Amino acid sequence: MTDLKPVTKVFISYTHVVPDQSLAYFLVDYLVNRGHRVFVDTNIPVGFEWAAEIKCQIEASDFFVVLLSKDSIRSAMVREEVTLAYRLSKRTERALIILPVRVGFQGELPYDLGAYLNPIQYALWLNHESYESIGEQISSAIESAIALPNPGKSNDEEASTSCIQALAAVTEHLGAPLPSADLRLETGAIKVGSPFYIERSSDSELKKYAVMQDTTTIVKGMRQIGKSSLLARAYAAFPNHERQAFYLDFQLIDQSDLVSLQSLLRYIARKLAKFFKTKIKPHDVWDDEFGPKENLTDFIEDAILMETKSTLLFLFDEADLVFRFPYCKEFFAIVRVWHNQRATKDCWSRLNLIISHSTDPSLWIKDSTQSPFNVGYRITLEEFNASQVSRLNSIHGAPLKTTSEIEALMRLIGGHPFLVRQCLYTLATSGASLSELNKVAANENGPFGDHLRQYLWPLQEDKDLREALQEILRRGGCDDEVHFQRLCSAGLVTGDSRTAASLRCELYSRYFEKHL
């Protein structure tokens, strides 16, 4: 009796635009005809069932094909799917194999996507070429383990100016916002810079604090309000920033490096050693008898601070990601120690710290003497005001013609920086009126559909968080402070307290009243 060969399961991640969608549908037919089971998201009603099904299908797949185009690299949902696929590619049993396909785009991938996909070989489809060759390359990779033809690159390899310019050309130079800030576009280090960036008072504040002696600066703000962009500009403004300012985005740290305090601090030590090209290496000072906190502190002092007379800057972006781990108090205690060391050791006065976060640290760190969040300078990022929205509207060619239209836009989406930019970009490029956009704003195929759907994933996975949001929708408040803070940090709700909470804007209210 002959054993039946198991069916290979393939997930295709793409955006619903041309040519991405037509290539995705071609690949479905091509691979199904070769006996594979292929999943695309065309037949699932959007809602919690949709979010659960997407996650389930990726987890059950053997191969993950992601189509990367000038449009999909801006997709929040493609990011969510790629992030999950990357984690599954690291599992010890039945690792998911990722197969990237560049769709008419050969520029640098955005910072966050590139962290996952740069090292992987990829296929390339150029405009007007037949889809057939892509089908052959993908099927060969699936059936015969033949590598895709274009080589990946190490994330340590510096991106070329032309590739960064190509990325800027389809994003910042068009006014098309990325869901996550890209340090290389934000800094203008190679004269890319965004003409659509609106400076706020926080920009000059942070630049000033960054270059002062022995400063700790805390930057707080909800998701997508511009914290990373603000840090990027402080990084660029720091003297000799490429050699003396170290930037770490906690969102891009592998799960394997976050499992324990020891693994996280060893990871930070390795990153510091690589960045500063230290003569002393982490293993030279690491001694398990003293514990990881003392080891990392000794490494920073001996290998970095004692080797320079210049002021150095550490920027920790989205550091509150550590709050979800049991060792969070210990981690932030060590950062507080670095701050305190300035009083007793001159070398530590040469280290400036900038830490960005979204949620209230007091929920996780009860002992104020062990927290870095209650010392130094503090900056709270707020939404755009009407004047700033008006300036951004002018930069986009004034698709909003009157003050009343600007007020109507702010009733719909508030001053949420990402949503304001997405709205103005859509109006400027589509020629639609604000009234027309408003009618479809909360629809799945509307201009904010991708942004809205990304929230269904975490809400589907967290029943308590979902119920807290439902509670706020029903009665304007919720009973749990932690859930309120998490919803605030995500940018979904606002309010002075959990008992006086509401959805942040009309767009969110309309969408979640329909889907919760």
Image (cartoon, helix red, strand yellow):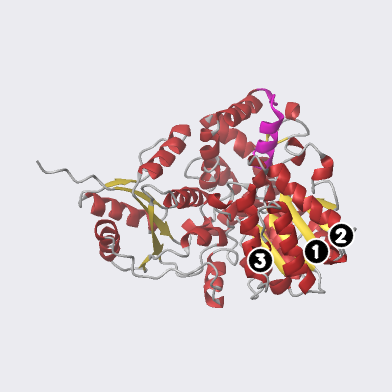
The residue sitting at 65% across, 54% down in the picture is 288
Residue 285 at x, y = what percent?
69, 63
The quarter of the picture where residue 149 lies is: bottom left
* Residue 489 within the magenta-colored segment of the rendering: yes
Q: Residues within 10 Å of mark 3 (few under 14, many from 20)?
A: few
Q: Which mark's residue is nearer the viewer, 3 or 2?
A: 3
For residue 294, side relative to residue 72 (left or right)? right
Residue visible at 67% across and 22% down? 475
Contact (Cβ within 8 Å) of mark 1 with mark 2: yes
Q: Is residue 451 magenta?
A: no
- Rendering coords of residue 267 (x, y %): 61, 58
Residue at the far left: name it. Answer: 1
Circle 3 SS class: helix
Depth order, front residue of 167/420: 167
The residue identified by callout 2 is: 342
- Dot 2: what SS? loop
**Viewer-closest of 512 and 293:** 293
Task: Kindly identify the amino acid type of the residue bearing the numbered disc 2.
Answer: Arg
Give above or below for 470 relative to 251: above
Q: Is residue 55 visible?
A: yes
Q: CA distance from mark 1 to mark 3?
A: 22 Å
Where is residue 324 shown, x and y percent of the image? Answer: 63, 40
Residue closer to the observer: 376 or 371: 371
- Numbered disc in front, either 1 or 2: 2
The residue positioned 47% from the left and 34% from the top of the image is: 47
Note whether residue 207 is visible.
no
Q: Quadrant of the N terminus?
A: top left
Residue behind mark 1: 351
Per the rendered image, the range of residues in magenta is 475-493
Is disc 1 placed on a helix, strand or loop?
strand
Q: Which three-letter amino acid code belongs to the residue tagged 1?
A: Leu
Question: What residue appears at the point 60 percent right and 47 percent down from the top-left corner?
Answer: 434
